[in-house]
Image (cartoon, grey):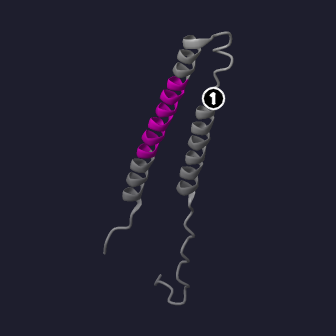
Amino acid sequence: MPPQQDAPPPTARKRRRFFLWFFLAIQVLFLIWVITGAASGDTAAECAGLTGDELELCEDAAGVGTAIGVGVIIFLWAAVDIILALTYLVYRLATRQPRA
């Protein structure tokens, strides 16, 4: 059977932006995590009843702990972004159209 000459050309599929929205959702989650982690440095309960040098030391230690925690979150954020970028790169290379 010969191919039909009057057949309409195939319509181009609309590209879905699933990866973009997934990536943006991950960014929002990490941003919320960093903000809540930085805001959780409340020292009122831990340092209650301390005075003078002990109070200052307790507050400083709480600040250092909060900074380390936020640093770990930012490190995880960067690691996840790198993994997502490499995954997207592999996906794009695997699904690209061959050159004619």
**Residue neighbourhood size for the residue with mark 1, other residues' Cα within 10 Å, grouped as few (<14), some (14–19), many (≥20):** few
Choose between 32 and 93: the one closer to the eye. Answer: 32
Kindly give the residue lying farthest to the front in the view shown. Answer: 52
Q: In which image quadrant can residue 6 be found?
A: bottom right
Between 75 and 66, the one nearer to me in the picture:
66
Above or below, 28 relative to 100:
above
Q: Is residue 47 magenta?
A: no
Residue 84, horizontal then vertical, whole percent: 45, 47
In the picture as drawn, the residue positioned furthest to the left comes out as 100
In the shown orientation, is residue 42 left or right of residue 9?
A: right
Element under label 1? loop
Specify the quadrant of the image occupied by residue 50.
Answer: top right
Q: Residue at x 63, y 21 (%)?
A: 43
Residue under the point 57% across and 62% down: 16
Residue sitting at x 39%, y 48% = 86
> Residue at coordinates 56% horizontally, 85% vertically from top-left?
8
The answer to whether residue 82 is left or right of residue 30 is left
The mark tally for this picture is 1
- Residue at which label 1 appears: 40
Specify the quadrant of the image occupied by residue 26.
top right
Kind of residue indicated by mark 1: Ser
Look at the image and tell me in which quarter the C terminus lies.
bottom left
Magenta portion: prevailing SS class = helix
Furthest-bottom residue in view? 6
Instruction: Give how far across and how far down residue 96 sits, in percent.
Output: 39, 63
Q: Percent from the top left, x then y, of residue 52?
A: 58, 12
Left or right relative to 72: residue 28: right
Percent from the top left, x then y, of residue 62? 56, 21
Looking at the image, is 98 positioned above or below residue 43?
Answer: below
Magenta-tinted stretch:
63-83
